[in-house]
Amino acid sequence: MQLSSHKQARRSRKNTPLVVLITGASSGIGKACAEYLAARGFVVYGASRNPVGEAGVHPLPTDVTQPESVTLAVAAVIAEQGRIDVLINNAGMGIGGAIELAMPDEISRQMQTNFMGTVNMCAAVLPYMRSARHGRIINISSLAGSMAIPYQGFYSASKFAVEGYSEALSMELHPFGIKVSVVEPGDFSTGFTAHRMVSEATLNHPDYGMRFKRCLRIIEKEETHGCPPAKLARKLYRIIRARRPRFRYRVGALLQVVFTKARAIVPARWHQTLLRLFYGLLR
């Protein structure tokens, strides 16, 4: 009896390294994760606008906000490897400021990078995974994607969008053997803090300015003293190797993870009061 093409493909994959494509791989969490996976025998392609090939990671010039760029990048991996086993959507950026004062171009940049970047990558990779009846997609969200953070409103909105998109995607792809997981990191010590765009309009606003500066100092302190990126890299490795990965993983400092989980059982009024207290917004 001849094996089906899908069964033959599964059998051949057992003896070959998994092919991983990770976005936002030039710095921070993406860089640490790409290098960690490459060191453990995966064939890793690191996609970013300004890629740097190092530590066994194949550089892949990609702008996730541009569908044409994404299509070319994915096609390049397929041409070299014949498949993509794992897609990790990690590319992201942050803009800090009051929701009321956010400019249309700031909102667009936030959503285009964090949300549409994920959508664009999935749209380009999925035809190959679906054809193979095989694949894993790991979308990097944030604890701020299940619990909104003050003065990070559109960052939270972009991550909430990733969460909803991923839930629907997971159900739609189940019949094709493609597993979808969402990873929600807390605060990690990376270059994200230094690269955050800050709203000058909010800084100089008579009502928002003082509160924003106080809140931003707390946010930056938590990020600077956050977990090392290697912690998330280890978690991604375990998710990839898991036979039956969960849909949602929260990774970070214990207190942050517990507080986020508590949102499901603590009255919303109490939860928001605790957040305002933490971020210095009770006055």
Image (cartoon, grey):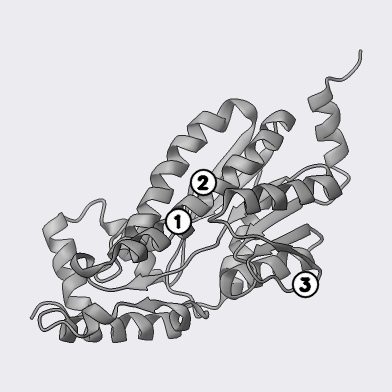
To which residue does mark 3 refer?
A: 53
Q: CA distance from mark 2 to mark 3?
A: 25 Å
Q: Quadrant of the N terminus?
A: top right
Residue 205 appears in the picture as rendered: yes
Residue 215: image tag:
none
Disc 1 packing (10 Å; few <14; some 14–19; many ≥20): many
The amino acid type found where label 1 is placed reads Gln
Judging depth in this view, the residue of 177 and 96 nearest the camera is: 96
Q: Position of residue 85 (x, y in %)?
A: 72, 45
Instruction: Residue at 82% x, 61% y: name it.
Output: 41
Q: State the residue lying farthest toward the top.
A: 1
Q: CA distance from mark 1 to mark 2?
A: 9 Å
To which residue does mark 2 refer?
A: 119
The secondary element bearing badge 3 is classed as loop
The image shows residue 191, relative to residue 61, as above or below, that is below
Q: Position of residue 175 (x, y in %)?
A: 59, 25
Q: CA distance from mark 3 to mark 1?
A: 25 Å
The amino acid type found where label 2 is placed reads Val
Q: Is residue 124 left or right of residue 43?
A: left
Judging depth in this view, the residue of 95 and 191 nearest the camera is: 95
The amino acid type found where label 3 is placed reads Gly
Q: Position of residue 181 (x, y in %)?
A: 53, 47
3 or 1: mark nearer the eye: 1
The image shows residue 11, relative to residue 165, as above or below, that is above
Instruction: Residue at 36% x, 63% y: name it.
Output: 105
To which residue does mark 1 refer?
A: 112
Q: Earlier in the sequence, mark 3 or mark 1?
A: 3
The secondary element bearing badge 2 is classed as helix
Disc 3 packing (10 Å; few <14; some 14–19; many ≥20): some
Judging depth in this view, the residue of 272 and 116 nearest the camera is: 116
Residue 244 appears in the picture as rendered: no
Instruction: Residue at 61% x, 73% y: name it.
Output: 230
